Amino acid sequence: MPGPGRHALPWSTIMFLTLVVGLPAHAGELRHPLADTAADLRASVEDGYRTLRLDGGAVISEVGRPELPVRRLEFVVPAGQRVSGAALEGTRVVRVGDGTNLRVTEPWISGEGKPSIAAMPARIADEVWPAEEAVIVADQFGHGARIVTIEVRPVRVHPEGALMMAEGGQLV
């Protein structure tokens, strides 16, 4: 029985996902098509700062960095297989704006666990941020299956301040 905040997947769903999603396309390599485009990016202004989101997505919340949209994908990995890395392939990179006045993640300051969104300049480094387009953020077991979570980071800030988005392609 699942605890608070946990969701149980029926065994039949786990088996279906293992067969459909978890099977490698060829020679031990998992491939998953990606469909996000610049048209899926939602921009708004909150407390004077621009925010960017993908429907059904999450955000990177690294202190001192802009909150950029990400897509987290979960895969059931067949027994005997392992995921050693993640990358994007076949994407089209387009400019989706500039990195000025983006909402930035600040340290937790409240005893109630609420982050502050007060003014704090975004750090635009000498290289593209986030550095990786796709990363493994969790590798765990659940319901007798191995589940790997990969975070796809399609929107990145370039040193000159341009916001670039990788559209389409596939996760490998």
Image (spheres, helix red, strand yellow):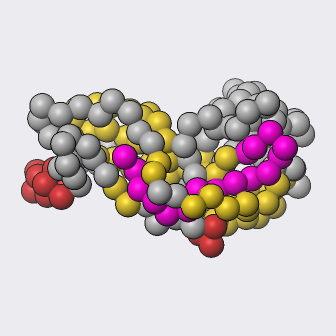
Q: Quadrant of residue 3?
A: top left
Q: Quadrant of the N terminus?
A: top left
User: Is 161 one of the magenta-colored residues?
Assistant: yes
Residue at 80% of width from left, 39% of height from top? 159
**Is residue 79 found left or right of 35 in the rendered image?**
left
Say above or below: 81 vs 164.
Answer: above
Residue at 79% of width from left, 60% of height from top? 97
Number of marks drawn = 0
Camera sees residue 114:
no
Residue 64 in the image: state x and y as whole percent.
Answer: 76, 31
Residue 30 in the image: state x and y as whole percent.
Answer: 27, 47
Residue 143 in the image: state x and y as whole percent.
Answer: 16, 39
**Is residue 35 found left or right of 53 in the rendered image?**
left
Q: Quadrant of residue 41?
A: bottom right
Camera sees residue 152:
yes
Q: Nearer the viewer, residue 12 or 97?
A: 97
Residue at 34% of width from left, 55% of height from top? 32
Q: Nearer the viewer, residue 25 or 73?
A: 25
Magenta-highlighted residues: 157-172
Say above or below: 163 vs 123.
Answer: below
Residue at 40% of width from left, 50% of height from top? 171
Say above or below: 123 vs 99.
Answer: above
Say above or below: 75 vs 122.
Answer: below
User: Is 136 one of the magenta-colored residues?
Assistant: no
Residue that sits furthest to the bottom in the current view: 39
Q: Quadrant of residue 62?
A: top right
Residue 98 in the image: state x and y as whole percent.
Answer: 82, 54
